[in-house]
Amino acid sequence: MINNHEELAAHVGAEDACEGTVARRVYMDTSCGATVTLHDGYVLVGTIVEGSDAEFTNDRLVYPFTEEAWAEAIQACEDFADAHWGEEET
């Protein structure tokens, strides 16, 4: 169970629970370059597909949430990016 920003940071292997550090770790560890924003009591996970207008923000993950919920949120970003890769900007 992930109960707060500190536990999320530890789960993803970030050095600390600072938003920039957690976001960079997640960005670097995902093929889609997932984005993370930390808020009081919850986290938003999303992605922007480079070279297209496609942008995805997953439902917010409210603390506490499971490791499985985290993995599903990341996978949803990866799946979205895969589906929209190569679409041209309008």
Image (cartoon, helix red, strand yellow):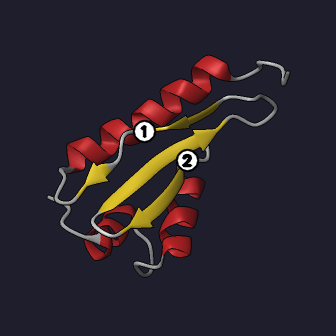
Q: Quadrant of the N terminus?
A: bottom left
* Residue 44 in picture, x, y percent from top left: 42, 52
The amino acid type, in three-letter code, at marker 1 is Asn
Answer with mark 1 or mark 2, whichever residue precedes in sequence: 2
**What residue appears at the point 59 percent right and 18 percent down from the top-left corner?**
83
Q: Is residue 19 above or below residue 32?
A: below
Q: Residue at x 18, y 66 (%)?
A: 3
Q: Residue at x 18, y 50 (%)?
A: 66
- Determine crowd level at label 1: few under 14, some 14-19, many 20+ residues with C-alpha closer than 10 A: some
Quarter of the figure with residue 51 = top right
In this rendering, the answer to whether 25 lies above or below 74 is below
Decide which of 78, 42 is in the foreground and name it: 42
Q: Quadrant of the C terminus?
A: top right
Secondary structure, mark 1, is loop
Q: Point out which mark residue 19 bears.
A: none
Q: Which residue is mark 2?
A: 34
Q: Which mark is residue 58?
A: 1
Q: Position of residue 28 (x, y in %)?
A: 59, 56
Q: Nearer the viewer, residue 46 or 27?
A: 46
Q: Is residue 31 visible?
A: no
Q: Secondary structure at mark 2?
A: loop
| Disc 1 to disc 2, C-alpha distance | 10 Å
